[in-house]
Every structure is written in structure tokens, then in C-alpha cells.
Image: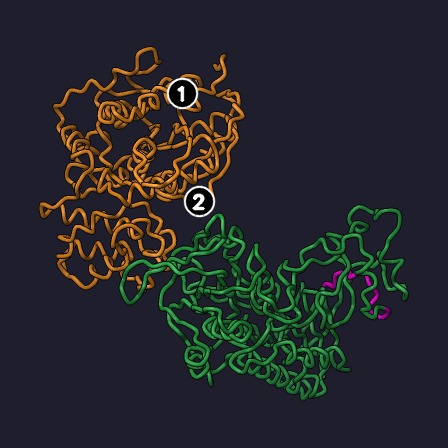
Amino acid sequence: MKDVLVIGGGVAGIQAALDLAEKGVKVHLVERTPSIGGRMAQLDKTFPTMDCSICILAPKMADCGDHPNITLHTCSEVTGLEGESGNFQATVLKHARHVDASKCTGCGKCTEACRMKGRIPNEFDFGLRKRGAIYLPFLQAVPRVMNIDSKKCLFLKAGKCGDKQLCKEACERGAIDFDQKDETLKLDVGAVIVATGFDLFDPSEMFEYGYGRLANVRTAMEYERLICASGPTGGHLEVEPSKEHPKSMVFIQCVGARDLRRSPFCCSVCCMYATKEAVLVKEHYPDTECTIFNVDMRALGKGFEEFVERARNEYGVRFVRARPGQVTEDPVTKKLSVWYEDPSSGRVASMDADIVVLATALVPGAGTVELARVLGVELDEHAFFKVTDPLMEPVVSTRPGVFIAGYCETPKDIPESVAQASGAAARAYEVLKRKKGGAANA
Amino acid sequence: MSAEKTQAVESTRAYYCVECGKCTGICPVSRGLEYSPRRMVKRALEDPELEFVHDSQIWNCLTCKLCSGVCPSGVDYIDFIKIVRSRAYSQGLSGSCSQGGQLNTMARLMASDRLAQNRNFWTEGLDIAEKGEVMYFSGCLPYFDTVFEDLKPDTLDIAKSTVKVLNAAGIRPVVSPAERCCGHDLLWGGDAVSYRALARQNIREMKRLGVKTVVTSCAECYRTLSQDYKEMGADFEVKHISQLSAELLDQGKLRVKPSGKKVTLHDACRLGRHSGVYDQPREVLRKIAELVEMPRNKAAAGCCGVGAFLTCGAHSKRIQVERLIEAGATAGILVTECPKCQIHFKCALKDKPVPGAKMPELEIIDLASLLARSLEAGNP
């Protein structure tokens, strides 16, 4: 039976890879960044059950890394797809990590030694923590192999790192390999599953909310890192510059989403994650006032409405139906004011906040258009991957043998992504079975 | 449904309003008066004959366009207000004009095509032409110094400076004694009939003179001539002096010496949010001074507090003082690109209208004036 190519190592890609591997299919899981895990790895808790996100995901990541039928290609991207359903030849560009994966144990001694240590914003924590030029993306990274940022490494950039390469000296196993080159792999696969997830809309273009200019305005994803016990502040929310914990928090929903001039679609998760985030504040600091400014609450999953009601009644989270027009800052105290139209009076009102959290739009990943071109599949008007029939074929792309799973198809939450991934895996398996039996293309 | 209603709610996308109130949240007027752009839109949607135009609230809007800039539905609120006011005016209603209606009356007087003006008295010593392809449109500048004598705004200096800058680059602009007010204030005050009369006369005069490019030193003239005159059949190119001088500086046709002084720029709504001109005034300022940005700049810029000389009240003063304090905390010199912004700020600086507010030490000067002072001797 032919192998399957899965593109994207988030929860959807992981699920699809595991489903197929368990059926005995060899899977190539291609991930652009140095570790699989995706967005779910960055979340603190999941709604509505308040499970620890990485605690749920990490075992699946480890299964993926250890599975005899799964080959991980991290730091890699798909650059070509020839052939047809049941008989594709994929080209994968594997960027050099400059670390020999067979020798590295992820001990971290190189990171400690790196001259750039603590000077480069860490992608995983949205720059809230700093890393070195050689680093492990995050604690639970799979594979647990160091990665050298070739754009930041002094030696790789300029050919010189002080009088000696400190990381190389620190590594007891001789795993560091500055001569490692990018590789191009040719893979014969029967089917392809695309699960590239989403990117975050950058709210700094919306001057009204002051993101990037006002220190205490954060995005929801930054908040997830800040409230996480393994995050940059050990799970303590800190107000700048006092570093005290917040007495009042405001969550602004649909920032750049449901906006006819930006992302007109609903991200489908911000109502629920904001509720979760407000509940988390209350669990950390019961006296902190939490207000969620929403366009309308969309709590339509199993147990969602009950979760919102609990947030409101048990935790005392306030919900206000309004889109704030502006966030201003007192130049001296740095206290924020959120300006909005009070829906009960129709008059302008302002609410004080120590921290404002912006629920930004979630948009198709930056490389989506290029990937669609490479794969020869169509995108919809928002650059999500098109399926041939959203009703009856929700995983089938416009090219036979290529299947779609997760957020990159259309906005959805974690369980829906997982379900769609299993669906895509099943359809990919069908292609392989049919091919084996000598039947026509799927 | 009336034709105006259809126009007010459809062409302006008011139908798309989702009642989120974001407009009210950012509106500078709503923080001083009871005012909600959202509720105005809602009333138009619920009121087939636009009877709500009798409510004086329709005159509160500054048309600064902050609300439209942040509206998730892209509702063109200021165009909506323009249409609503036109409807109101046609029913004999009008806003309470500051300056006792003097400026609007002058504009209406100019609507007569038999009016002989002595509007070029200030051009002595400057090199101007009677006919040609480049015209300098001086707008209300020849009148402001008289109307606002007490404030000593020296707006004529803006006109003289603009021509000096053009002369320095070897341009002899047409300055027409038959020019009329561009009609901006009448258009935004609802008097569309008089506005159109003024626009027709200006366009006719420009065609007669063979004008291909019109230079303005006023953000409101710029918006009116470049956008609103298009609907009236104008086919000339319009450039604000900041745009033209940025080009001339770039081409080496204008030589300046930098002063090294710290200045900050107040983006005029008509040039900024209405027309998207943000970079060229900055390019010019960087060549003649040290430009420091206020926290609220470009599309986020605060307002000068009054639009079209309508409803100047305590809320306007609060808006002006807030902006002046912001400017004073940024630099010692506030540069304006619209004579009206300058007048409004100078008024607030002189009057100190907000008790307890610590007014800054601030010099207020127009970009054209500052540029003319920075010209190097020996320009072509």
C-alpha cells in the first residue's frame, strides 16, 4: 500500500497521521516549524471542559514522534505534487536544522552556551520570552531536537561567533553540524491530507485598540501564554509597569473578524475561548472584574451555553453587547479606558481596565495561497481550502486524492478539527485500498 | 420610501449597520454631547420620510470620519450625515453656525456670478499668471484674516507662502480674481443648491483659464475639489501644497535648509481620513525640521473640534484643548495643513476655555508657511 502525505503538524494533522498509522499506513507528516503541535500546543486550557491543552495534546504528539509508521519532516515544506490520485510524487524541501537529529538528546546545554541566549523573541510565546539562536521551540517539542535559527546564528550569518562556537563546545554528543544542507526529498504517496490551520490577524493596524502602542493591550493568544503555568510569567498576569495582578480585565471580541473590510467571517471560537479566558482570570484572581464585549454570543456546541451561563452566574463574568470604539491610556498611570456605547442607555460610556485582551480574527495561514498553487487545489474567497461539496464531501478538495482537515478548510474548534481529520484519514485510506485492488482513481 | 431615504441608507451602506455602537465609542462628540452615530442610522432605517431631520442632533457631527474608519460594516457615516443635512436644509432647517453665519453668508454671496471681488489684493510682489495650466486656489484665505481679526491667524501668510514656494520652484501659478469659495461649508451644512452654484462657477472658470492642475493650501478645498467636484464634471488634477512640494523636493526643484526644530503634525481630517494623504506632508516636514509624531496620528488623529463652522460649543473646546495638550507634550511647534484647523486651535489656545486645563506653550504654523521660511536662497 502507498504512503500518505500529511501537511501540517497541528492537532488535525496529528490526528490524521495517527489514524492512518494505526491502520498500518506509512505516513509522512510535514511541518514547516521545528516542532509539531500547532496552535493547540500554545493554548493554556480548552473549552468548555477546562482541560489543560498541552496535557491532552502532548501524548498525541509523542505517539506521532514514536510511531513506527510515521516519519516526521519538521522544518519542511511541500514544494511540488506531480501525478494523480493513488500515485503522487511529492517534493519536500527539508531545511537544515544544523543539528543531527540522531545524536541530539534535547539536553539544552547548547542553548545555555549560545551567545545570543535570551536575545531573540521566541515564536512560541509571541516574543514574550526570549530564546537563543539554538533553541528548543518549547518544552514538549516533538521531535525533541534543537534547532539553529540560521537567520540569527552569528556563525551561520557571518561565519564567525567570537573566538569559538560555544554551542559546539557545549554539546557532548557532537550533534551540531554547521555544514548540514537543505535537502530535497521525493516521496511516492497515494493520497495527501492538508491540515495547515490558521494564522493570527495582526491587530496593530486597528489603531483604535492601540495594540503594539499600549503595553497592557494583549492578543488572546498572548494571554494564553501569560496565563499558562509553563508560560513566560509562570501563569501570573502582570500589569505594566507595576507588575501587580489586574483588578479589572476587558475582553474585546471579533477584532478584525466579522468585519466586512477585513475578515468578514466568524472565527467560530472567540466567544467560547474568551469565556474560558475570563473564567481563568476568576480562578486565578476571584476579585478581578471581567467584562466580555461581544457582538453576540455564539455558544452553539455541546455544553457551550451552560459554560457561558456558569461564567456569568457562578464566576460573575459580565457580558456587554457592544463593540468598543476605542481603548485609551492614561499617560501617567497606564490605566486603560475602554470606550463603548452602553446598549441599555444608547450613550457613550467608558470602563476602566488594567489589561485589555483582543480576540483577533483567525485567518488562513500566510503560505496558503502558495501551497494551493503547489498542490493544484482551489481556495475559496477567504483563502480557505475549497471542498467539492461542503454538505456531503466536507474533506474532499478540488483535486482528486487531496483531502482537507481542520481550520484551513473553514473556521472550527478543536473537536471539529479532530473529527474532520479522522474523516480525511478515512477517505485517504479508501484511495489506497482502491489503488491496491487495481481499481480506478478516487 | 423617499429618494433621499434610499440614498441615505443604501449608497452609504447604512443598511449594513449591525448596531455594535463602535462609532459612538470612538466619536469625539459623543464624549461631550448626548450623541450616537449608531442611533442616527437606526432612526433613518426606521423612519421612511426622514422626519428625524428636525432633531438638532444631526448638526452635531464634525464629519471627522473617525467613525467610518473603524466601522466593521464600512458604513459611510459622514456621507449619510451630508445627505440627511441636505434633506433638513431643504425643509428650512439649518445648524447653528458659529461666527453668526457670517462665513456661510459670504459663501452664498459668492454664488452670484455678477459679484466682483477684490480677492487678489495680497499677491503684490509675487509672480502670478492670468492664464495657465497650474492654478493656485486660495479659497477663503483672503477673507479669514478679517473675520478672525481678534485671533490674528495670519492665514494670508499661508496663501503668500504657497505662491512663494511655487515661484521658488519656477512655477507661475494662475490666481484668479473670479475664484469663488469652493462651497465646502455649504455642502456639509446641507445647502447643496448654493454649493453646486459655486462649484459650477469655479469649474467654468478653471476651464476658461485652461487649468490642468489646481494647487490648494487648504485640506477642505482639497477634498472638495478633488472628490466632490468630480461629480460636477471637473477633470483637473488637484494637489495639496504638501503633495506638490514633496514632489518638487524629490525632483530637486526646490531647495530647503532644515531648521532642526522639533515640530509635530496635526493631520487634517479632509486631507487624512477623507483623502488618505498622510505621507507627503511628513516627507516635507522631515526635510525642513525634526518631525515628532503625536500618539494619535494619521488615521487615528484627533479632531480640531469644529467642522464646516457648525456647532462650536464646550465639547469642541474640550476636543481642541485635548489635542493642544497632546501636541504640547510632543513638540514646541504644531504644524497644520488646513487653515481652519489653525484657526480653531489658535482660538482655543487664546481663550483657554477649559478651566483647570494646563495649556501648553505652543507655536502653531501652517505647513506652507513653515516651508516658505525654510526656502534656501538661490532656488531656480
Q: What residue did someone put label 1 on? A: B166
Measured Cα–Cα span from mark 2 to mark 1: 31 Å
The amino acid type of the residue labelled 1 equals Leu
Taking depth in this image into account, of A85 and A180 the one nearest to the observer is A180
Taking depth in this image into account, of A41 and B247 the one nearest to the observer is A41
Report the span colored magenta: A92-103
**Label disc, if present, on residue B296 of the rendered structure:** 2
Chain B in the picture: what colour? orange
Above or below, B340 relative to B379: below
Query: What subunit carries mark 1?
Result: B
In the rendered image, residues at marks 2 and 1 fall on the same chain: yes
The amino acid type of the residue labelled 2 equals Arg
User: How is the rendered protein coloured?
Assistant: by chain
Comes first in the chain, label 2 or label 1: 1
The structure residue drawn at horizontal position 18% and vertical position 56%, both measured from the top left corner, is B5
Q: Secondary structure at mark 1?
A: helix
Q: Position of residue B136 (x, y in %)?
A: 32, 24
Which image quarter: residue A222? Answer: bottom right
Q: What quarter of the picture does the N terminus of chain B occupy?
A: bottom left
Which image quarter: residue B97? Answer: top left
Residue B250 visible in this rendered orientation of the protein: no
Chain A in the picture: what colour? green
Q: Nearer the viewer, mark 2 or mark 1?
A: 2
The structure residue drawn at horizontal position 41% and vertical position 30%, both measured from the top left corner, is B362
